[in-house]
Every structure is written in structure tokens, then in C-alpha cells.
């Protein structure tokens, strides 16, 4: 009997808290189509929060959705190329529940 009460109390305790949501956002794929020696590709992708500020119970939520991707490739010869990627993202809802 006590075990069932402890189980219910533990279940309520561990499921009653809200955890901020951090989203996984993979980078864009870098698939350069380089045919000849000297061909190159440069790509820059930008993501931002264009919706602006949101309000929850008269409190401003500073949700973030910012980041960028930098991608480049260069064909050294007809058979070999060098490719480089970098991405940086910051995405979270700052602890507020979605309405």
C-alpha cells in the first residue's frame, strides 16, 4: 500500500515540472556539384526569429531562433575537391509553455 502511494507521489513530482524546449536543427546539406578543376561553391544560410517578441501573462518571452550556416567547396583537380562547413544555432523557448 505504501509503495503505491510513493509511486504516485513520485510520478506526480517528476512529471509536474516544465522543462524548456531546446530544438534540434540540423545544418543544411553541402552537396556541391563540381565538374571541372577550379569550380567552386559558396553557400550562406541565415535563420532568425521574424515573429518578434511574444507575451505570456503580460511577460515578454525572449524566445530565440537564430543561427547561420557557412558552406564552401573548391575543386582542386578533376577528381578531388576540398569541402568545409560551419554552423551555429541558438534555439529555445526560454522556459515558457507554448500557447
Image (cartoon, helix red, strand yellow):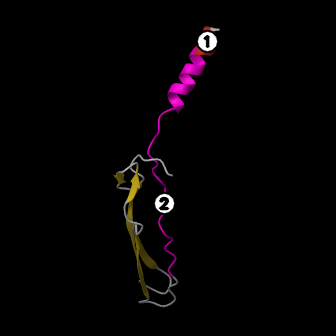
Q: Position of residue 40 (x, y in %)?
A: 42, 86
Would you place residue 25 above or below residue 59 in this image?
below
Q: Are marks 1 and 2 in contact (CB under 8 Å)?
A: no
Determine whether the residue tagged by mark 1 lies in a helix, strand or loop: helix
- What label sits on residue 25 in the rendered view? 2
Residue 87 visible in the picture: no
Boundaries of the magenta span: 6-32
Query: What is the distance, in whole Å, between disc 1 and disc 2 at their CAs?
Result: 42 Å
- What label sits on residue 48 in the rendered view? none
In the rendered structure, the answer to whether residue 37 lies left or right of residue 60 reads right
Q: Nearer the viewer, residue 39 or 26?
A: 26
Determine whether the residue tagged by mark 2 lies in a helix, strand or loop: loop
Outermost front residue:
58
Q: Residue 51: which quarter of the image?
A: bottom left
Report the residue marked by disc 1.
3
Magenta stretch containing residue 12, yes or no? yes
Q: Nearer the viewer, residue 26 or 36?
A: 26
Residue under the image location 47 percent in, 34 percent down: 17
Quadrant in which the N terminus is drawn = top right
Q: Nearer the viewer, residue 55 or 69?
A: 55
Q: Position of residue 95 (x, y in %)?
A: 41, 46
* Tag in front: 1 or 2: 1
Q: Would you say the magenta stretch is mainly helix, strand or loop?
A: loop
Check disc 2: other Cα within 10 Å, few if <14, some if 14-19, many if 20+: few
Amino acid at each position: 500500500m505504501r509503495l503505491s502511494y510513493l509511486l504516485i507521489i513520485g510520478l506526480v513530482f517528476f512529471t509536474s515540472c516544465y522543462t524548456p524546449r531546446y530544438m534540434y536543427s540540423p545544418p543544411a546539406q553541402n552537396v556541391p556539384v563540381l565538374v571541372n578543376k577550379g569550380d567552386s561553391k559558396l553557400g550562406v544560410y541565415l535563420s532568425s526569429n521574424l515573429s518578434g517578441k511574444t507575451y505570456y501573462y503580460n511577460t515578454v518571452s525572449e524566445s530565440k531562433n537564430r543561427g547561420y550556416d557557412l558552406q564552401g567547396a573548391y575543386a582542386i583537380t578533376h577528381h578531388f575537391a576540398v569541402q568545409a562547413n560551419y554552423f551555429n544555432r541558438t534555439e529555445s523557448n526560454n522556459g515558457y509553455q507554448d500557447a
